[in-house]
Amino acid sequence: MDTFRKQNLRKGAKERLNTLPEEFKRRASLSICQHLLHYLQSLPTPPSSLLGYIPQAEEPDTKPFYREVASSFPTLPIGFPRVEEKDLAFYLWMSKTLPGDAPVESPPDPAWEIGSFGIPSPSPSLPQFGKDIPWGDSPLVLVPGRVFDRQGGRIGRGKGYYDRFLRALRQKGIAVRAVGICFTIQLVEEVPRTESDEPIDHLITEEGVL
């Protein structure tokens, strides 16, 4: 029953996202980036690392946030994920360029390649978190999703990558902060949960931190 409900909620969220005007998404994304920056600055202690993701077309555009963090927090290690078999692996962002930054006619940036599901992913030749460089004691993880509620519930795209990733860190005793990112149109009253679902700690929309 929960799987069926999740599928329906995921489908409904996708339909709502497809109705959003591009200008609204642009303005809302900028608001989300500002709220993210204020959230980061308000933490009692800086995170040991920032683990982001490259947004897809229908998701809030968080790339301005990464650029600002790279400028304002130059010593904070920032990582992006790539899918490796059934798990997420995060690699250090070293080039300080993001997919789409360079003109189309420019040579491809060797720091990025097209990974699983056609999503730009960091090159596996870069330093890997948890292997070449440490996560640190308190990484901040930005988590995408299709549907969220205000109690820490989240529905992704159905593959479970972030649930497995967050569970693995938490089981190691790492004090990870998981922050969901979405438009308010993706919020529902309650997300059905199973034992395999990992909660998020905070949620940020264009309206602020929830």
Image (cartoon, helix red, strand yellow):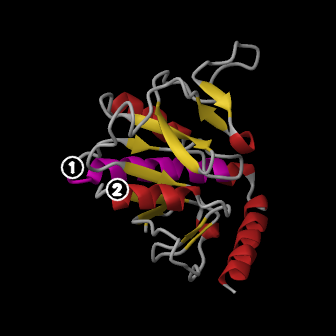
Crowd tier of the residue under label 2, counting other residues whose Cα lies within 10 Å: few below 14, some 14–19, many 20 or above: many
Report the quarter where the N terminus lies. Answer: bottom right
59 sits left or right of 76 in the view: right
Seen in the picture, residue 205 relative to 65 is either above or below; the reply is below
Answer yes or no: is residue 56 visible: yes
Q: Which residues are magenta?
A: 25-44
Out of 43 and 85, give the one closest to the viewer: 85
Out of 116 and 192, give the one closest to the viewer: 116
| Number of callouts | 2
- Dot 2: what SS? loop
21 sits left or right of 78 in the view: right
190 sits left or right of 210 in the view: right
Query: Which residue lies under the disc numbered 2?
Result: 176
Q: Whole-percent x and y of residue 182?
A: 57, 60
Badge 2 or badge 1: first in the primary sequence: 1
Query: Which residue lies under the disc numbered 1?
Result: 45
2 vs 1, front mark: 2
- Residue at the (61%, 26%) spot, across then down: 112
Q: Mark 1 belongs to which amino acid?
A: Thr
